[in-house]
Image (cartoon, rainbow, N blue to C red):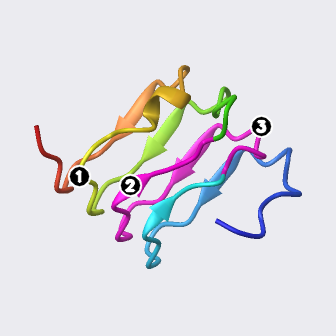
Amino acid sequence: MEGLDGLRRLEILDLHGNQLRYLDNLNSLESLRIINVAGNVIRSIRNFGPSGLLSLVELNLKRNRLRNLNGLEKAPNLKKLLISNNELQK
């Protein structure tokens, strides 16, 4: 996602209802606590960066096209994960 690099103090990011295909390149958002990207067409979570999103506690991924949850290991403090209505497989 481009254009967010300078927002280091941003705590809440709401991009629901767009046509986003990927959730990526958020590693510069060190203070980010809540992300809402419900109602997009996201297929994968990519590149939370080497240090990850350590402040992230809530992630809403409802109504997307996720096939797996790879990448979430980079958000070790996540407390709330909403993932209904996706294409998750075993």
- The alpha-carbon separation of the residues under discs 1 and 3 comes to 26 Å
The verdict on residue 47 being magenta is yes
Work out how far the residue at label 2 is from the one at label 3, CA to CA, in angstroms: 21 Å
Callout 1 amino acid: Arg
Q: Kindly report the distance in space between the C-alpha atoms of the residues bearing marks 1 and 2.
A: 7 Å
Quadrant of the rendered image containing residue 80: top left
Residue 27 point in image, percent of width and height:
70, 44
- Label pair 1/2, CB-CB below 8 angstroms: yes
| The residue positioned farthest toward the top in the image shown | 77
Q: Which mark is residue 85?
A: none
SS under mark 2: strand
Spot occupied by residue 25 in the image (x, y as percentages of width and height)? 65, 54
The residue under label 1 is 67
Q: Which amino acid does label 3 sit on?
A: Glu
Q: Which amino acid does label 2 sit on?
A: Ser
Q: Identify the magenta region.
A: 26-48
Quick check: marks 1 and 3 in contact, CB under 8 Å? no
Q: Give the vertical position of 4 relative to 40 (above or below).
A: above
Residue pictured at 77% horizontal, 37% vertical: 30
Examine the residues drawn in magenta and state their main secondary structure: loop
The magenta stretch spans residue 33:
yes
Residue under the point 47% across and 59% down:
37
- Among the two numbered marks 2 and 3 on one chain, the one whose residue lies closer to the N terminus: 3
Residue that badge 3 annotates:
30
Q: In which quarter of the image is the N terminus?
A: bottom right
